[in-house]
Image (cartoon, rainbow, N blue to C red):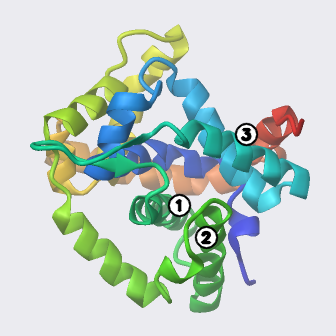
Amino acid sequence: MVRNLADIGAEGVLLAGAGRAILLQIANPAVGHGVAEHSDFIARPLDRFRATVTYVYAVVYGTEAQVAAVRRSVNRAHSAVRRKPESGSHGYSAFDAQAQLWVVATLYDTAITVYEKIYGPLDDEAADLMYSDYARIGTVLQLPANLWPADRTAFRTYWDTSLLTLELDAVTAGVGRDLLYPPAGPLWLRMSMPLIRFVTAGLLPDHLRAGFGLPWSDRHSRLFERTTRWSALVYPRLPRLLRHCVKNYCLGRLRTS
C-alpha cells in the first residue's frame, strides 16, 4: 500500500524524535544562534513545541484557513529573528533559505528514521511520495521549491555532507543543554526528561550526542535497541484514535482568526 505524508504524519510516535530534530537544528549556527538570542523556547518549551507540531499538522491535514493561520503565526515569530554577521559572531535570519532547508530536512529525516524503526522500511514508491510531500512543509513558508533536493539520493548527499559540517560552539551547546535539562516546567515534564534524553541520545549522531553532553555506552545502545523492538511490537497495535490524538488535539485548538 502506498504511504504518503498524510498517511504517516499523524502517527504520534513520530514525536519521539522531536528532541533529535530540535538538537540537529540548533547544531546549525544559523539556527542555534537565532534561538539563543530571540526565542523563548527555553522558557516556554511546551508552547514552542506545540506551535511547531501544529504548523506541521496544519500543512498536512488542515484547511486552507488553518494553513494561512499557521503561516501568519510563524512569519510573525520569525520576523525579529535576524542579525548581520559581526566580527567573531554568526549572522542569521529566520527567513534564510538555507537555514529553512536545514530545519525541514531535520523534520523529514527524523520522521523517516523513527517511522522505519517502528513500522519497517518504506518501499521505494511510498518513500519517494513521502519525500516529495515533505517539501511543502518548507514551501508553505519561504523555502524555494527548487532548493529541496531533487530526490532521495540527492537528499542523502546533502544530509550526509551537512552533518559533517555541524560543530557545536558554546552558544549552541548551551541552548541544547538548557533544553535537555530544563530548570523549570511542569512536574510531569521534568519527570519525563530522563526518558526523553535517552531516546534523543539514541537517535543522534555520535559526535552531536557527545557535544550535547548526553552519556552513551554499549549498555545504553543495547537498551535502546530493546526499547525500539518493544515499541515496534506494541505501538502499531494501539487504537488509531490514540495514535493520532496529538494531531487531533492540535488542530482542534488551532484558531483561524
Residue at horizontal 17%, vertical 46%? 168
Asked whether the beta carbons under mark 2 and mark 3 sit within 8 Å of each other, the answer is no
- Asked if disc 2 and disc 1 are in contact, CB closer than 8 Å, the reply is yes
Q: Secondary structure at mark 3?
A: helix
For mark 1, does the 10 Å Cα neighbourhood hold few (<14), some (14 to 19), or many (20 or more) residues? Answer: many
Q: Is residue 248 left or right of residue 35?
A: right
- Which residue in the protein does label 3 denote? 246
Q: Which mark is residue 36?
A: none
Distance of label 2 from label 1 (alpha carbons): 10 Å
Q: Earlier in the sequence, mark 2 or mark 1?
A: 1
Q: Which residue is mark 1?
A: 111
Say the numbered circle drawn on residue 134.
Answer: 2
How many angstroms separate mark 3 from mark 1 (CA)?
Answer: 15 Å
Amino acid of disc 1: Ala
Position of residue 7 relative to residue 23, above or below, is: below
Return the residue nearer the eye: 232 or 182: 182
Q: Nearer the viewer, residue 247 or 102?
A: 102
The amino acid at mark 3 is Val
Q: Quadrant of residue 101?
A: bottom left
For the C terminus, the image quarter is top right
**Against 117, is 52 above or below?**
above
Looking at the image, tell me whether mark 2 or mark 3 is earlier in sequence order. Answer: 2
Q: Which amino acid does the dot numbered 2 rest on?
A: Tyr
Q: Position of residue 78 (x, y in %)?
A: 54, 42
Element under label 1? helix
